[in-house]
């Protein structure tokens, strides 16, 4: 699963268990999306999940400690989704946004714009005829 050869001295064994746990969390989240999200949100959410997990398992971009934090944040997301009868999401705090890099901020804006567009088009479909 390595995209490139890990650096010399990289603790490959240190990533084995976190990667296993990450794969389990990913499967649980995909199942949760299937149960809880409307089809449009599920498709977008599943693609985003898979992309993020694929990016973070790269040892050149993510240390074992960073990967553990990454997985824990997704576990927290799963808990939040499970607790909701109707999935509404959650706004990021300013402190959470401070830790995003430029690419993540761009991706967040794009995701926001896509979801707002989907909501607007769904609202138009359900407007009563005049």
Image (cartoon, helix red, strand yellow):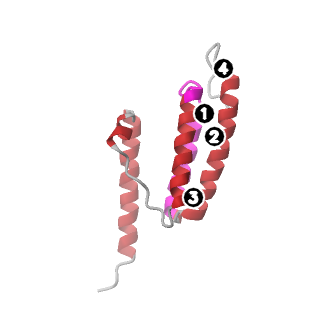
| Sequence order check, earlier mark of 3 and 2 | 2
Estimate the spatial distance between the alpha carbons at disc 3 and disc 2, rounded to whole Å.
16 Å
Which quarter of the figure has residue 14? top right
Q: Is residue 53 above or below residue 38?
A: above
Check disc 4 and report the residue beneath it: 11
Q: Nearer the viewer, mark 1 or mark 4?
A: 4
Boundaries of the magenta span: 40-65
| Sequence order check, earlier mark of 3 and 1 | 3
SS class of the residue under badge 1? loop
Percent across and percent down for residue 77 are 51, 50
Estimate the spatial distance between the alpha carbons at disc 1 and disc 4, rounded to whole Å.
13 Å
Check disc 2 and report the residue beneath it: 22
Estimate the spatial distance between the alpha carbons at disc 3 and disc 4, rounded to whole Å.
33 Å
| Sequence order check, earlier mark of 1 and 4 | 4
Estimate the spatial distance between the alpha carbons at disc 2 and disc 1, rounded to whole Å.
9 Å
Residue 111 in view here: yes
| Sequence order check, earlier mark of 2 and 1 | 2
Estimate the spatial distance between the alpha carbons at disc 3 and disc 1, rounded to whole Å.
21 Å
User: Which residue of the protein is positioned furthest toward the top in this rendering?
Assistant: 8
Asked if labels 4 and 3 touch by Cβ distance under 8 angstroms, the answer is no
Locate the N terminus and report the quarter of the image it occupies.
top right
Check disc 3 and report the residue beneath it: 33
Q: Nearer the viewer, mark 2 or mark 1?
A: 2
Residue sitting nearer the eye, 17 or 41? 17
Which quarter of the figure has residue 108? top left
Locate the C terminus and report the quarter of the image it occupies.
bottom left
Which numbered dot is residue 57? Answer: 1
Asked if labels 1 and 2 touch by Cβ distance under 8 angstroms, the answer is yes
SS class of the residue under badge 2? helix
State yes or no: residue 45 in magenta.
yes
């Amino acid at each position: 699963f390595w995209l490139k050869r890990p650096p010399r001295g990289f603790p490959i064994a240190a990533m084995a268990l976190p990667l296993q746990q990450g794969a389990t969390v990913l499967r649980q989240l995909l199942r949760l999306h299937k149960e809880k999200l409307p089809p449009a949100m599920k498709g977008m959410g599943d693609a985003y999940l898979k992309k993020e997990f694929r990016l973070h398992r790269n040892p050149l971009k993510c240390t074992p400690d960073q990967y553990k934090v990454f997985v824990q944040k997704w576990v927290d997301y799963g808990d939040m989704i499970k607790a909701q009868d109707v999935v509404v999401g959650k706004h990021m705090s300013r402190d959470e946004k401070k830790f995003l890099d430029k690419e993540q901020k761009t991706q967040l804006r794009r995701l926001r714009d896509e979801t707002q567009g989907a909501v607007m088009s769904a609202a138009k479909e359900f407007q009563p005829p005049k």
